[in-house]
Amino acid sequence: MQQSIMIIGSGSMAEAILKGLLERYRVEVVAREGARLEKIRENYGDTVQVVPLSQEVDISGKRVIMAVKPYAYAEVAAKLQGQAFALLSVMAGVTLADLKSATEATYTVRAMPNLAAKYGKSMTTLCGDEGFKEEAMQICGAFGKALWLGSEKEIDIATGIAGSGPAYLALVAEALADGGVKAGLKREDALSLAQGLFAGMGDLLEIHPALLKDAVMSPGGTTAAGYGALEEKGVRDSFIKAVEAAFLQAQKLGKK
């Protein structure tokens, strides 16, 4: 008998998690009526139970993934009745204390996945009640890799890497393609090259990034020339500051 999980929310992250969970769990989606919820009905049919959030929702004894926007959490939590077995939140910046004060649950855990969950390749970080650690890791393992961290501060830092990282890497991919077009490649060919490059990077990064860089960069070669141009423009420093900015913003969200 498959375990049942309730996902509250119907946005991009909620659907990405939904796709990852379907092979291992029975999934129930709770969300406001609208185009996104209708899309889930159309795409998944009877494989997913859909419950409109226009009514009070009983979460008693359930494993609940909270995947709404942080600003909407208080309003949504007010419609939930009973005590969940576990609450797994993927809302950036919403603290464990705030989660526990708004939603009753035996165990409460924060998680930060990314949109690669849609393909079973999310890098998800977690922290919270140790009693649900193993099961939370298994749930998040259904849509990628999972890493348990020791504190909420670390989760907020991780938000700036694994959570926001796809947007940063999308910028890199677009910039590389733009560089190819500027040099004379067709746009579609430049994009194909960028996509192919990223497809292999996960395996390559099994070694330390510095060793990978040194393996590619030969003396006086093309990579050394390009790398020098990146350092001249402060690209490394910009990425470091991007992670820090995302971390600080996650902390601000948690204080609102």
Image: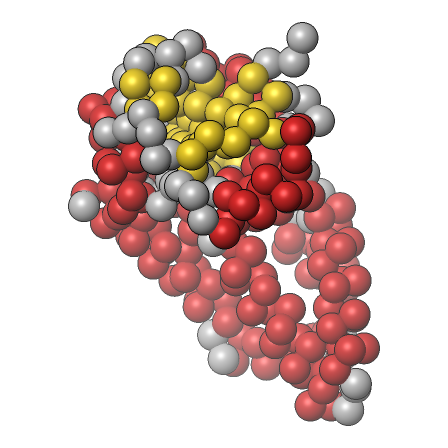
Residue drawn 50% across the image and 52% down it: 35
Residue drawn 37% across the image and 12% down it: 60
Q: Is residue 10 above or below residue 246?
A: above
Q: Quadrant of the N terminus?
A: top right
The x and y percentages for residue 98 are: 23, 30
> In the image, is 29 to the left or to the right of 91?
right
Q: In this view, does 190 lie above or below 14?
A: below
The x and y percentages for residue 146 are: 57, 31
> In the image, is 189 to the left or to the right of 144?
right
Residue 222 sits in which quadrant? bottom right
> In the image, is 241 to the left or to the right of 46?
left
176 or 135: which is nearer to us? 135
199 or 7: which is nearer to us? 7
Residue 121 visible to the viewer: no
Residue 3 sits in which quadrant? top right
Residue 144 sits in which quadrant? top right
Residue drawn 63% across the image and 21% down it: 25
The x and y percentages for residue 123 are: 57, 40
Residue drawn 32% across the image and 13% down it: 83
Q: Which colour scheme is used?
A: secondary structure
208 or 10: which is nearer to us? 10
Q: Is residue 238 above or below residue 143?
A: below
The x and y percentages for residue 63 are: 46, 18
Give the number of callouts.
Answer: 0
